Amino acid sequence: MTSAERTKRIYERHPYPGTDLGQLSQKGRSFPSLKWMQAIGRPGRAVPERVLVAGCGTGVEAFVLRRRLPRAEIVAVDFSPRSITVARQLQRAAGSGRPITFLVADLTDPALSLTTGGNFDLISCHGVLSYIPKPGRALRSLASCLRPEGALYLGANGEATPAARLRPWLAGFGLAVDEMKNERRLRELLRLWDSLHDDELGELATMPSSYLASDVCGAHFNNWPLARWRAEANRCGWEVAGTDILPTALLLTIEREDYLPLYPAGCGAVAARLDQIRPAGFHRMMLRRAEAGGLDLAFASKAGQRLRWTGFYAVRFMRNAGHRTVKVVLNCPTFHLRFEWSLTPRQAEALRTLVASGVVSEGWIKLWTQSEEARRILWFWLGLGVVAMDAAAQRHRLSNEVECSPLLLSN
Ligand SMILES: C[S@@+](CC[C@H](N)C(=O)[O-])C[C@H]1O[C@@H](n2cnc3c(N)ncnc32)[C@H](O)[C@@H]1O
């Protein structure tokens, strides 16, 4: 039996995250906000009309998206027939709202676009590719399902996932970790583990069987650093537009003025490098198709690229003494970030216009690229999620790692 078949068997036995409607309605807090997915993945685009939930399990992820997007057409697929049966039952029991189409389908199937109807604006794939032996196959078929201006939210295990150290430790007690065989013994050992650990997930010993069977035991794991997920995505025609850790981690380096070795590079490259220093247990990434355009700071207004105000920040302007500079305070409840910048009156005025209009003009780009300092502010703001690149407006594929040459940046 291949590891994909073994994985399917595990989910057939233990549909994820479970089968109890009462308990499932409490879940869904680990999915990122639609606002973040839209702002980073599809800046300036209208709310998605067609959404694919790729590897939906018993449907919690799809039901969360249904609540957020009551009018969208949602298709949700999983290769475990039992998970899909449970999802359909849960939908019938819940009863209200536009129905979600639940289908049995394998994400690695090159015909996925035909099975699902393709043409999606947004694909959500949370906690699935970590269990697929060749995730590149799934990344390719997902790419074929997306509209050019669409985006993929990908949630995948990182190097620091508790399972990475837990599994060899459990195996050291003679426990089978490739498939959950003795749940009582497993929970006993997890209680011991929990007493000495403070994992971000909480008490592992109290997790449902469906979690332990697939996320602790299991047939296959890709617990990869972000750099590896990014390389795999790039290989399959995707670019990483942003990650959940990027704003917070980048701000720390900016505050300590340690960011120089990171500069200038695109959001995906910076996030991957920061993850190498502080590995995450789970990555939340927004991906876009590479042919939609380069995502990095190599913009030239000639090529029609645009930057958009993401709307994550509230801005306050304060004139400094002598009126030579304006202090700008940006506050973002979504990322729990607050920082200040000292801008020239012209820059502050340009920012005010951007906040009001949502889109930068050609003059705006010129202003922010005429000096190294101004370029750096713009680079920070891209990483911190103040502005985002409008990929669909970019038809020119520019270099992935940015060169901030005046040639590229001026028009
Ligand atoms: C950990 S669960 C995540 C479920 C859901 N995304 C969530 O977060 O609630 C992983 C799911 O991926 C499904 N899966 C794994 N490999 C798959 C594949 N090749 N094609 C489709 N589904 C797959 C499993 O059946 C399982 O339901």
Image: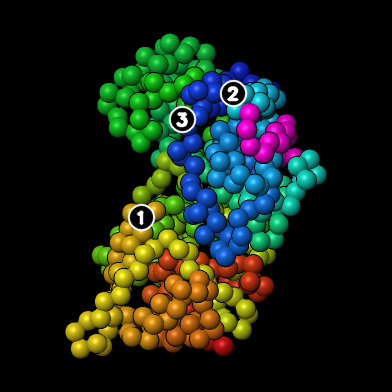
| Front-most of residues 318 and 182 | 318
Q: Looking at the magenta stretch, what is its main secondary structure? A: loop
Q: Residue at x 31, y 19 (%)?
A: 192
Label 3 crowd (10 A; few <14 / some 14-19 / many >=20): few
Name which of mark 1 and mark 3 comes first in the sequence: 3
Query: Secondary structure beneath disc 1?
Result: loop
Of the residues tagged 2 and 1, which is closer to the observer? 1
Along the polypeptide, which appears first: circle 3 or circle 2? 2
Residue 172 image point, x, y percent: 40, 20
Badge 2 density bin: few <14, some 14–19, many ≥20, Cα 10 Å: many
Indicate yes or no: mark 2 CB to ligand 1 under 8 Å: yes
Name the residue tied to disc 3. Answer: 26
| Percent of width and height locating residue 297 | 50, 73
Label 1 – label 3 distance at C-alpha: 23 Å
* Residue drawn at point x = 40 percent, y = 86 percent: 371
The answer to whether residue 254 is seen in the rendering is no
User: Which residue type carries mark 1?
Assistant: Pro
The stretch drawn in magenta includes residue 111: yes
Report the disc number at residue 333: 1
- Circle number at residue 15: 2
| Of 329 and 260, the residue lying toward us | 329
Amino acid identity at mark 2: Pro
Q: Residue 318 lies in what quarter of the image?
A: bottom left
Q: What amino acid is labelled 3 in the image?
A: Gln
Residue 325, position in %: x, y? 27, 84
Q: Which residues are magenta?
A: 95-112
Q: Is residue 305 left or right of residue 250?
A: right
Picture quarter with the N terminus: top right
Judged from the image, the secondary structure of the residue bearing numbered disc 3 is loop
| First of labels 2, 1 by sequence position | 2
Give the percent coordinates (x, y) of residue 405: 50, 82
Q: CA distance from mark 2 to mark 1?
A: 35 Å
